[in-house]
Amino acid sequence: MENYYNLLGIDQNASSQDIKRAFREQAKRLHPDIAGKSGEAKMRKLLCAYEVLSDRERRYEYDRAYSRFVKHLDFDYRAFLESQEEDPESQAKLVFFDLLHLDEEQALAVWRTQGGLGFPMEQYLNREDWMDCTFILAEELEKRQCYYEAFVLLVHLVREERRQPYFRHFMSDIEGFLKELVRLRLKSAVDEETYIACIENLLELGFSSRDEARWLRSMAETLVQMGNLDAAQGVFREALKRDPALPNVVQLRRKLKV
């Protein structure tokens, strides 16, 4: 099983230039004109490895998780975890092991078999492993257009980070990931009531007034679509309290007479 360094053919002390050079060389071999469709899956993994290792903060987080969780054992650790089908702790560790070794499909299959969002991995992994695992899992779900599941995991992470910092400087990337998911993907992926519930969860996390105003505007627009004008008016007023200069509200003002 490969990790990101093995996939690029470099050692763990490789410089940023070494990473770029290795990526270009590997990408040439996987070009569709050379490898055809058979190289598409490996190219996706190669891109993922490059995106992580070429970013200093993400590389640090990956190294920290990998070195802490993956041990050099004299037996097949994965086979051992896989054999413990009735043990949720072993299955949680198996999900994380497979994610760290680029076997994302298998990791997702195990996670879903254990209940997906209903699988309380925080009960079976230590806090650091759980947070690292959850972030990687959210990334993989987002890539597969499972936007709601990715959203729920990211909200859980942000809430836990607010309670007790772990990611620290890397947290800005996670928050950016969550905000982009909400801005571009989430609304079209869920029904209106679920979307409103998602925004309510966001508002509990302590983001900036500017961010909250935009989410409240979107909630008000959704309530208008649902025909609940009274609730929409109240939500829209809350949005304007947070940001009186909130953009793109002309039509909403007309509809709600605010």
Image (cartoon, rainbow, N blue to C red):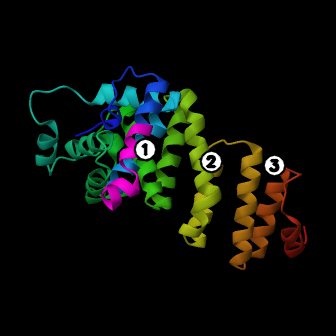
Viewer-proximal residue among 203 and 2: 2
Q: Residues within 10 Å of mark 3 (few under 14, many from 20)?
A: some
Q: Nearer the viewer, mark 1 or mark 2?
A: 1
Q: Is residue 137 above or below residue 162?
A: below
Q: Position of residue 77 (x, y in %)?
A: 15, 36
Q: Is residue 163 magenta?
A: no
Q: Is residue 30 magenta?
A: yes
Which residue is the site of mark 2?
204
The magenta segment is 24-38
Amino acid type of the residue tagged 3 in the rendering: Arg
Q: Is residue 184 above or below residue 47?
A: below
Kindly give the residue lying farthest to the bottom in the view shown.
227
Which residue is the site of mark 3?
242
Q: Is residue 229 visible?
A: yes
Amino acid type of the residue tagged 2 in the rendering: Glu
Secondary structure of the residue carrying tag 3 is: helix
Q: Position of residue 177 (x, y in %)?
A: 57, 46
Q: Nearer the viewer, mark 3 or mark 1?
A: 1
Residue at image position (54%, 68%) is: 189
Q: Position of residue 95 (x, y in %)?
A: 28, 46
On the picture, is 85 further left or further right than 241? Answer: left
Q: Quadrant of residue 175?
A: top right
Tag 3 near tag 1, CB within 8 Å: no
Q: CA distance from mark 1 to mark 2?
A: 31 Å
Q: Looking at the rendered structure, which numbered label has been put on residue 132?
A: none
Which quarter of the image is occupied by the C terminus? Answer: bottom right
Q: CA distance from mark 3 to mark 2?
A: 14 Å
